[in-house]
Image (cartoon, rainbow, N blue to C red):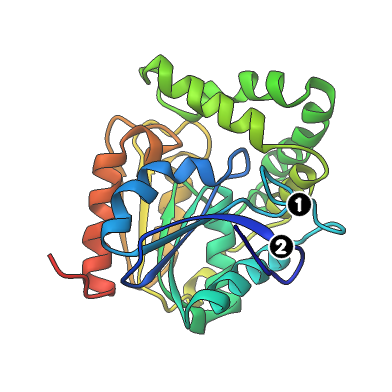
Protein backbone atom coordinates (compact mmCIF):
# COMPACT_ATOMS: atom_id res chain seq x y z
CA UNK A 1 0.00 0.00 0.00
CA UNK A 2 1.07 3.58 -0.47
CA UNK A 3 1.16 6.68 1.66
CA UNK A 4 1.67 10.30 0.62
CA UNK A 5 4.95 11.90 1.57
CA UNK A 6 6.45 15.33 1.04
CA UNK A 7 8.21 14.00 -2.09
CA UNK A 8 6.59 10.99 -3.82
CA UNK A 9 4.28 8.20 -2.63
CA UNK A 10 6.18 5.44 -0.87
CA UNK A 11 5.36 1.80 -0.34
CA UNK A 12 4.98 0.55 3.23
CA UNK A 13 4.44 -2.78 4.92
CA UNK A 14 2.11 -2.72 7.93
CA UNK A 15 1.19 -5.15 10.70
CA UNK A 16 -0.79 -4.79 13.90
CA UNK A 17 -4.13 -3.16 14.54
CA UNK A 18 -3.79 -1.61 17.98
CA UNK A 19 -1.36 0.25 20.18
CA UNK A 20 1.03 3.08 19.39
CA UNK A 21 2.75 3.45 16.02
CA UNK A 22 6.28 2.10 15.46
CA UNK A 23 7.79 3.46 12.25
CA UNK A 24 10.74 1.44 10.90
CA UNK A 25 13.35 3.05 8.62
CA UNK A 26 15.75 0.68 6.85
CA UNK A 27 19.43 0.95 6.02
CA UNK A 28 20.93 2.25 2.80
CA UNK A 29 21.18 -1.18 1.17
CA UNK A 30 17.80 -2.54 2.16
CA UNK A 31 14.03 -2.08 2.24
CA UNK A 32 10.97 -2.82 4.35
CA UNK A 33 11.85 -6.52 3.95
CA UNK A 34 14.62 -5.99 6.51
CA UNK A 35 11.95 -5.62 9.21
CA UNK A 36 10.13 -8.91 8.59
CA UNK A 37 11.04 -10.16 12.11
CA UNK A 38 9.76 -6.97 13.72
CA UNK A 39 6.56 -6.92 11.64
CA UNK A 40 5.89 -10.48 12.79
CA UNK A 41 6.81 -10.17 16.47
CA UNK A 42 6.18 -6.60 17.58
CA UNK A 43 2.83 -6.25 15.81
CA UNK A 44 1.22 -8.12 18.69
CA UNK A 45 1.90 -5.05 20.82
CA UNK A 46 2.11 -2.03 18.48
CA UNK A 47 1.19 -0.98 14.95
CA UNK A 48 4.35 -1.55 12.92
CA UNK A 49 4.93 0.38 9.69
CA UNK A 50 8.09 -0.23 7.65
CA UNK A 51 8.79 1.87 4.57
CA UNK A 52 10.59 1.40 1.31
CA UNK A 53 12.43 4.74 1.23
CA UNK A 54 11.88 6.91 -1.86
CA UNK A 55 13.69 5.31 -4.78
CA UNK A 56 13.94 1.89 -3.11
CA UNK A 57 12.22 -1.46 -3.78
CA UNK A 58 8.53 -0.83 -4.48
CA UNK A 59 8.64 2.93 -3.89
CA UNK A 60 8.87 5.13 -6.99
CA UNK A 61 11.93 7.18 -7.78
CA UNK A 62 11.79 10.69 -6.34
CA UNK A 63 11.45 13.58 -8.78
CA UNK A 64 14.95 14.80 -7.92
CA UNK A 65 17.76 14.55 -5.37
CA UNK A 66 16.71 14.26 -1.74
CA UNK A 67 18.64 15.64 1.22
CA UNK A 68 18.61 14.17 4.72
CA UNK A 69 15.98 16.78 5.60
CA UNK A 70 13.83 15.56 2.70
CA UNK A 71 13.96 11.97 3.94
CA UNK A 72 13.10 13.15 7.45
CA UNK A 73 10.17 15.14 6.07
CA UNK A 74 8.96 12.11 4.13
CA UNK A 75 9.03 10.06 7.33
CA UNK A 76 7.21 12.85 9.14
CA UNK A 77 4.47 12.76 6.51
CA UNK A 78 3.94 9.04 7.16
CA UNK A 79 3.57 9.68 10.87
CA UNK A 80 1.11 12.53 10.36
CA UNK A 81 -1.00 10.37 8.06
CA UNK A 82 -1.35 7.57 10.60
CA UNK A 83 -1.06 9.10 14.08
CA UNK A 84 -0.21 12.22 15.98
CA UNK A 85 3.22 10.82 16.84
CA UNK A 86 5.27 7.62 16.66
CA UNK A 87 8.10 5.63 18.14
CA UNK A 88 10.78 5.47 15.45
CA UNK A 89 13.16 2.56 14.82
CA UNK A 90 16.00 3.34 12.44
CA UNK A 91 18.75 0.95 11.30
CA UNK A 92 22.05 2.37 9.98
CA UNK A 93 21.11 5.07 7.41
CA UNK A 94 17.56 4.79 8.73
CA UNK A 95 18.93 5.67 12.17
CA UNK A 96 20.51 8.84 10.78
CA UNK A 97 17.16 9.78 9.23
CA UNK A 98 15.44 9.06 12.55
CA UNK A 99 17.88 11.28 14.43
CA UNK A 100 17.28 14.16 12.02
CA UNK A 101 13.54 13.53 12.26
CA UNK A 102 13.77 13.91 16.04
CA UNK A 103 15.50 17.29 15.76
CA UNK A 104 13.48 18.58 12.81
CA UNK A 105 10.03 17.36 13.95
CA UNK A 106 10.41 16.75 17.70
CA UNK A 107 6.67 16.75 18.36
CA UNK A 108 6.21 13.70 16.14
CA UNK A 109 8.74 11.45 17.88
CA UNK A 110 7.72 9.75 21.13
CA UNK A 111 10.93 7.74 21.39
CA UNK A 112 13.86 6.58 19.26
CA UNK A 113 15.42 3.17 18.75
CA UNK A 114 18.68 3.66 16.85
CA UNK A 115 20.35 0.45 15.68
CA UNK A 116 23.87 0.05 14.26
CA UNK A 117 23.97 3.67 13.19
CA UNK A 118 26.15 6.76 13.47
CA UNK A 119 26.07 10.56 13.48
CA UNK A 120 26.58 10.35 9.69
CA UNK A 121 29.45 9.68 7.28
CA UNK A 122 30.20 13.40 7.10
CA UNK A 123 32.07 13.14 10.40
CA UNK A 124 35.09 11.77 8.51
CA UNK A 125 36.35 12.74 5.06
CA UNK A 126 37.46 9.23 4.15
CA UNK A 127 34.12 7.71 5.14
CA UNK A 128 32.24 10.40 3.22
CA UNK A 129 34.27 9.76 0.06
CA UNK A 130 33.74 6.01 0.35
CA UNK A 131 30.01 6.53 0.80
CA UNK A 132 29.79 8.69 -2.33
CA UNK A 133 31.81 6.12 -4.30
CA UNK A 134 29.17 3.45 -3.65
CA UNK A 135 26.87 4.91 -6.30
CA UNK A 136 29.59 4.42 -8.94
CA UNK A 137 30.08 0.86 -7.73
CA UNK A 138 26.37 0.16 -8.12
CA UNK A 139 26.38 1.64 -11.62
CA UNK A 140 29.41 -0.44 -12.63
CA UNK A 141 28.38 -3.74 -11.07
CA UNK A 142 24.60 -3.73 -11.20
CA UNK A 143 22.37 -4.55 -8.21
CA UNK A 144 23.06 -8.29 -7.99
CA UNK A 145 26.87 -8.18 -8.12
CA UNK A 146 26.84 -5.09 -5.90
CA UNK A 147 24.77 -6.96 -3.31
CA UNK A 148 26.95 -10.06 -3.49
CA UNK A 149 30.02 -7.92 -2.83
CA UNK A 150 28.57 -5.93 0.07
CA UNK A 151 25.93 -8.13 1.65
CA UNK A 152 28.07 -10.67 3.53
CA UNK A 153 29.79 -7.89 5.53
CA UNK A 154 26.47 -6.80 6.98
CA UNK A 155 26.23 -9.83 9.25
CA UNK A 156 28.73 -11.51 11.56
CA UNK A 157 31.34 -13.90 10.13
CA UNK A 158 29.47 -16.85 11.64
CA UNK A 159 26.04 -15.90 10.31
CA UNK A 160 24.12 -18.83 8.80
CA UNK A 161 24.25 -19.07 4.99
CA UNK A 162 20.49 -18.71 4.61
CA UNK A 163 20.61 -15.33 6.38
CA UNK A 164 23.46 -14.17 4.15
CA UNK A 165 21.40 -15.17 1.10
CA UNK A 166 18.36 -13.28 2.37
CA UNK A 167 20.45 -10.17 3.01
CA UNK A 168 21.98 -10.34 -0.48
CA UNK A 169 18.62 -11.01 -2.14
CA UNK A 170 16.99 -8.13 -0.27
CA UNK A 171 19.73 -5.73 -1.31
CA UNK A 172 19.69 -6.88 -4.93
CA UNK A 173 15.93 -6.36 -5.18
CA UNK A 174 15.90 -3.05 -3.27
CA UNK A 175 18.70 -0.80 -4.53
CA UNK A 176 18.80 1.07 -7.81
CA UNK A 177 19.88 4.39 -9.22
CA UNK A 178 19.21 7.24 -8.80
CA UNK A 179 17.66 6.56 -5.37
CA UNK A 180 20.74 4.89 -3.94
CA UNK A 181 22.95 7.78 -5.08
CA UNK A 182 20.64 10.30 -3.39
CA UNK A 183 20.71 8.26 -0.20
CA UNK A 184 24.50 7.93 -0.29
CA UNK A 185 24.92 11.68 -0.72
CA UNK A 186 22.53 12.37 2.17
CA UNK A 187 24.63 10.09 4.36
CA UNK A 188 27.98 11.46 3.13
CA UNK A 189 26.85 15.01 3.90
CA UNK A 190 25.52 14.20 7.37
CA UNK A 191 27.32 15.19 10.55
CA UNK A 192 24.78 15.26 13.37
CA UNK A 193 27.20 15.55 16.27
CA UNK A 194 26.27 19.15 17.07
CA UNK A 195 22.52 18.50 17.14
CA UNK A 196 22.39 15.19 18.99
CA UNK A 197 22.40 16.82 22.46
CA UNK A 198 19.19 18.66 21.54
CA UNK A 199 17.21 15.43 21.09
CA UNK A 200 14.59 15.26 23.81
CA UNK A 201 13.01 11.91 22.93
CA UNK A 202 14.06 8.97 25.13
CA UNK A 203 16.45 6.90 23.04
CA UNK A 204 17.62 3.30 22.96
CA UNK A 205 20.83 2.70 21.00
CA UNK A 206 21.56 -0.89 19.98
CA UNK A 207 24.63 -2.21 18.19
CA UNK A 208 25.68 -5.64 17.04
CA UNK A 209 28.73 -6.85 18.91
CA UNK A 210 30.41 -7.73 15.60
CA UNK A 211 29.26 -4.76 13.52
CA UNK A 212 31.94 -4.40 10.82
CA UNK A 213 30.26 -1.49 9.00
CA UNK A 214 29.56 1.42 11.34
CA UNK A 215 31.03 -0.32 14.38
CA UNK A 216 30.39 0.04 18.08
CA UNK A 217 32.30 3.32 18.37
CA UNK A 218 29.84 5.11 16.08
CA UNK A 219 26.87 3.81 18.08
CA UNK A 220 28.59 4.85 21.31
CA UNK A 221 29.07 8.35 19.90
CA UNK A 222 25.32 8.59 19.32
CA UNK A 223 24.44 7.20 22.75
CA UNK A 224 26.92 9.41 24.55
CA UNK A 225 25.61 12.62 23.00
CA UNK A 226 21.90 12.13 23.77
CA UNK A 227 20.80 12.94 27.31
CA UNK A 228 17.96 10.43 27.78
CA UNK A 229 19.55 7.30 26.39
CA UNK A 230 20.41 3.67 27.03
CA UNK A 231 23.03 1.68 25.13
CA UNK A 232 22.90 -2.07 24.47
CA UNK A 233 25.31 -4.39 22.68
CA UNK A 234 23.56 -7.25 20.88
CA UNK A 235 25.75 -10.35 21.20
CA UNK A 236 26.50 -12.61 18.24
CA UNK A 237 25.26 -10.05 15.72
CA UNK A 238 26.79 -7.94 12.99
CA UNK A 239 25.55 -4.72 11.41
CA UNK A 240 22.04 -6.09 10.85
CA UNK A 241 21.38 -7.02 14.46
CA UNK A 242 17.62 -6.80 14.00
CA UNK A 243 17.80 -9.59 11.40
CA UNK A 244 20.64 -11.71 12.80
CA UNK A 245 19.42 -11.82 16.41
CA UNK A 246 15.74 -10.82 16.14
CA UNK A 247 14.73 -12.47 19.39
CA UNK A 248 17.20 -10.51 21.51
CA UNK A 249 16.73 -7.34 19.46
CA UNK A 250 12.94 -7.40 19.68
CA UNK A 251 13.05 -8.14 23.40
CA UNK A 252 15.09 -4.98 23.99
CA UNK A 253 12.80 -2.93 21.76
CA UNK A 254 9.70 -4.24 23.49
CA UNK A 255 11.22 -3.63 26.91
CA UNK A 256 11.87 -0.03 25.92
CA UNK A 257 8.40 0.44 24.45
CA UNK A 258 6.86 -0.85 27.67
CA UNK A 259 8.55 2.06 29.41
CA UNK A 260 8.03 4.81 26.85
CA UNK A 261 4.61 3.73 25.53
CA UNK A 262 3.21 2.01 28.65
CA UNK A 263 2.57 -1.22 26.73
CA UNK A 264 1.18 -3.87 29.10
CA UNK A 265 2.98 -7.12 29.83
Q: Residue at x 62, y 43 (%)?
A: 28
Query: Which residue is at the front of the view, 124 or 102?
Result: 102
**Extreme residue toward the left, this view:** 265
Q: Which residue is mark 1?
A: 60
Quarter that holds the C terminus: bottom left
User: Tag 1: Cα neighbours inside 10 Å, few (<14), some, or many (≥20)?
Assistant: some
Q: Which residue is mark 2?
A: 9
Kindly identify which numbered label has been placed on residue 130: none
Sequence-wise, the earlier of marks 2 and 1 is 2
The image shows residue 200, relative to residue 203, as above or below, that is: below
Residue 77 falls left or right of residue 260: right
Residue 94 drawn at (x, y percent): 55, 53
Q: Quadrant for the N terminus, please.
A: bottom right
Horizontal side of 212 relative to 138 (left or right) equals left
Residue 128 x, y percent position in the rendering: 72, 44
Identify the element where label 2 is drawn: loop
Amino acid sequence: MSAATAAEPVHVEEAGTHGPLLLCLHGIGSSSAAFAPQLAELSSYVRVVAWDAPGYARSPDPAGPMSLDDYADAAAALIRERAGSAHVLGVSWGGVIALRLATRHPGLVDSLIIADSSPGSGTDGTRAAAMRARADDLAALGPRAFAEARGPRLVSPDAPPDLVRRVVDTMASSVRLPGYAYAAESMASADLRAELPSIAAPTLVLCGEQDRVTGTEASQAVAGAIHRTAYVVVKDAGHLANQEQPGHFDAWVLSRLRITASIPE
